[in-house]
Image: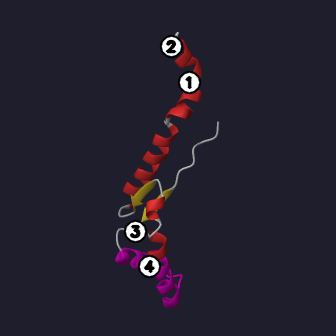
Amino acid sequence: MSDPIFAIFVLPPSREALEQRLRGRGQDSDEIIARRMRDAVSETSHCFEFDYLVINDDFDTALGELAAIIRANRLREPRQAAAHDALIKALLA
């Protein structure tokens, strides 16, 4: 059985934080950062198409939320039912 596919959108806590992070990397010119900031508006408009939204305000918290999403999806009924078919059949007998 294949794992279910789900989509996670990671948002910055603010536009200011996003710009600060981009500038803090020291890799892009002002023009590239301006383009990336414009692109972020368009990309963010699609966040409602995703199954989960995680706000990356604190890295450790966001990482924990991502791990929780993955754990929860591993426990979804179809996967668990397939993995524990013999147990479920024995309990129902």
- Residue beneath disc 2: 92
- Residue beneath disc 1: 84
Q: CA distance from mark 1 to mark 2?
A: 12 Å
Residue 73 position within the rendered picture, expressed as x and y whole percent measured from the top left? 49, 42
Residue found at x 53% / y 84%: 28
Circle nearer the viewer, 1 or 2: 2
Q: Is residue 24 magenta?
A: yes
Q: Which residues are magenta?
A: 15-40
Residue 38 position within the rendered picture, expressed as x and y whole percent measured from the top left? 47, 82
Precedes in sequence: disc 1 or disc 2: 1
Q: Is residue 19 magenta?
A: yes
The amino acid beneath tag 2 is: Leu
Circle nearer the viewer, 2 or 3: 2
Residue found at x 44% / y 54%: 52
- Residue beneath disc 3: 12
Residue 45 position within the rendered picture, expressed as x and y whole percent measured from the top left? 44, 70
Q: Are marks 1 and 3 in contact (CB under 8 Å)?
A: no
Residue placed most toward the observer, 31 or 78: 78
- Residue beneath disc 4: 24
